Image (tube, helix red, strand yellow):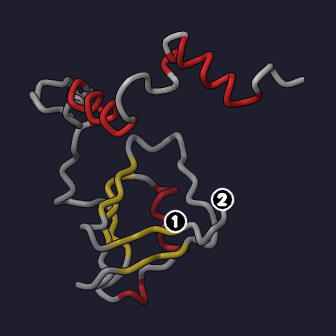
Amino acid sequence: MRPAGGFSGLLAALAAAGGLGLFPVGGSLTARAAQASQQARPLPGFGNPDGHAHVPAAGRAVNTSHPTQVIGTGTPGGCTSAAVVGAVAKGGIIAFGCGPRPVTITLTAPAKVVNTAHQIVLDGGGLVTLSGGGSST
């Protein structure tokens, strides 16, 4: 059942009641939007602008200059899924020797983290992408 006066009557009644915050009363919608944006508070900065957040020891950067394992022998051919899975299973600091160009290694099996390893760190030097190939298993 529609109220008397139809939809236009309902809009007029809402506007007369102060708009209920939904409809502009006095002035255009564009003018009200501009006024609202001028009154808006600036958003807080992203990240840690003051630089004083505590980072627990387990979350801090690790020195990877002396890896315990290196995947590959200097060419992309040595950087295989099996090599990554094997290295992760052993744990330690793992670096990649896949050559000077970016490479993507598509994992064909899960790289399972074994709880007996003290730490597992993978350092691709900004050149290695590990892909699941669209699978989660």
Front position in the image: 86 or 129:
129
Q: Which mark is residue 136?
A: 2
| Residue that extends furthest to the top in the rendered view of this protein | 17
| Residue that extends furthest to the right in the rendered view of this protein | 1
Query: Which quarter of the rendering shows the C terminus?
Result: bottom right
Return the disc, 2 or 1, that comes first in the chain's sequence.
1
Element marked by disc 1: helix
Picture quarter containing residue 135?
bottom right
In x, y percent, where is residue 10?
Answer: 68, 22
* Location of residue 27 with respect to 99 vertically, above or below: above
Element marked by disc 2: loop
In x, y percent, where is residue 52?
Answer: 12, 24
Instruction: Find disc 1 in the rendering and name its residue.
Output: 86
Q: Look at 30% across and 28% down and name the residue there.
A: 36
Q: Look at 37% across and 80% down and name the residue there.
A: 103
Query: Which quarter of the rendering shows the N terminus?
Result: top right
